[in-house]
Amino acid sequence: MAINNSSFVFGVSVSDYNFIGRQQESRTLKMNFEEGINTIIISPRRWGKTSLVKHVMTMVDQESVLTVYVDIFGCKSEYEFYNRLAEAVIKQTASSMERWMDNAKDFLARLSPKISISPEPLSDFSLSLGISPKTHSPEEVLSLAESIAIRRDKRIVICIDEFQQIGEMADSVSIQKRLRSVWQHQKHVAYCLFGSKKHMMSDIFQSKCMPFYQFGDLLFLPKIPTTEWVEYITSHFQDRRRSISTDLAARICKEVEGYSSYVQQLAWHVFSLLDEGDVVNDDHIDAALKNLLNSCEHLFMQQIIPLTEYQMNFLRAVIQGVHSEFGDSKIREQYNLGSASNITRLKTALTNAELIEADGRRIVITDPIFARWFKMRFID
Ligand SMILES: Nc1ncnc2c1ncn2[C@@H]1O[C@H](COP(=O)(O)OP(=O)(O)OP(=O)(O)O)[C@@H](O)[C@H]1O
Ligand SMILES: [Mg+2]
């Protein structure tokens, strides 16, 4: 069975053979889907939000709940979002083209000249609706799912990935107000909203003055525990006739601080050093770590090129163990951070660049491998 699967996968969402754990979170999310509770999922990058949501979508009883997944990455305007949303809703709540028409007859009627249905190989269709302010008001687009749910006598759950994109649109708060004012009255449709930019997701859902404050159940995704990773790593090595001790599997996890995608990536680098029958030792892990850092180098370089000297100094301070009191004159002098009023600007810029984040009152580096690379390059 294993041989048709990749041993380790990173960079894309995972399923089946490459998906582990998340029992508790899956249970909660499934329950929310089935009971129509809105959910917001927040976690640092690449911990497994998309994988979890897609996993739970396969768990719900399709007889009573229809699930829709839509990734709004790259949507620049309100109507671009509406088009992508309506296309996903129409397509994914129907199993055939006739059904689409049936589901959304009234909605589609005004668009008929603009529907372009291009058959792709083997029964898949792509749909482009051409919704504009001239054809539909925001309220009409946002009510589409509710009307389909009523017609089909089922609940619909709409999962919107990269939701922070809404926060990046011009006039974002008005858009959010419109979405919330329609969505909160829907009885047959629930929403699961998540995205990769943690600070923007937090701004949208955790600020009292924002429209989406207290919109639903906030799910903070924890790390996958080491014991589960150890089981995953050892069994996947075994499936390919290589072996690794539980201690060294735990070391892989520890080196990357249990950061999901890096666990898989580092395990992959270790695996790639072995031949059939080999047994992993510490040297393999040292070498794999070097390879991992090398493979990330280009990306990390791109992230720091735009930084100012003060911003670089701020990163140096955090990586060397300063997590608070940046305004303190001794710290500002020691790390050359500029004036006290500069500190807020530095924090904002580095948070927006996703390089640092607040962990309670402490400032920490978002990505443990970035921290390791930065230390190697600019500190040691
Ligand atoms: N449940 C899991 N089991 C095994 N590996 C996982 C799991 N969840 C995440 N991963 C690892 O993390 C990687 C990223 O997962 P995923 O894309 O689901 O995260 P994400 O939080 O949606 O990321 P982003 O913040 O970039 O949107 C996967 O490619 C995989 O290597
Ligand atoms: Mg994702």
Image (spheres, helix red, strand yellow):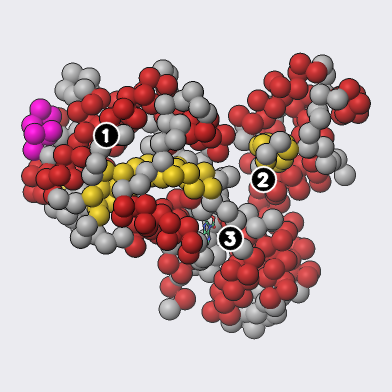
- Tell me whether the residue at label 2 lies in contact with that at label 1, contact meaning CB atoms closer than 8 angstroms: no
Q: In percent of the image, x 65 and y 58: which residue is there?
A: 258
Q: CA distance from mark 3 to mark 1?
A: 35 Å
Picture coordinates of residue 315, whole percent (x, y) = 76, 34
| In-front residue for pair 278/320 | 320
Q: CA distance from mark 2 to mark 1?
A: 39 Å
Q: Which residue is mark 3?
A: 224
Provide the secondary structure element on which disc 2 rests: loop
Query: In the image, what residue type sits under mark 1?
Result: His
Q: Which residues are magenta?
A: 105-111
Q: Which residue is mark 2?
A: 367
Asked whether the viewer can see residue 117, the reply is: no
Q: In percent of the image, x 44 and y 44: which residue is there?
A: 217
Q: Quadrant of residue 149?
A: top left
The answer to whether the residue bearing label 3 lies less than 8 angstroms from the nearest atom of ligand 1 is yes
Picture coordinates of residue 181, whole percent (x, y) = 31, 27
Q: Which residue is mark 1?
A: 185
Q: Quadrant of the C terminus?
A: top right
Is 135 one of the magenta-colored residues?
A: no
Q: In percent of the image, x 59 and y 69: which residue is there?
A: 228
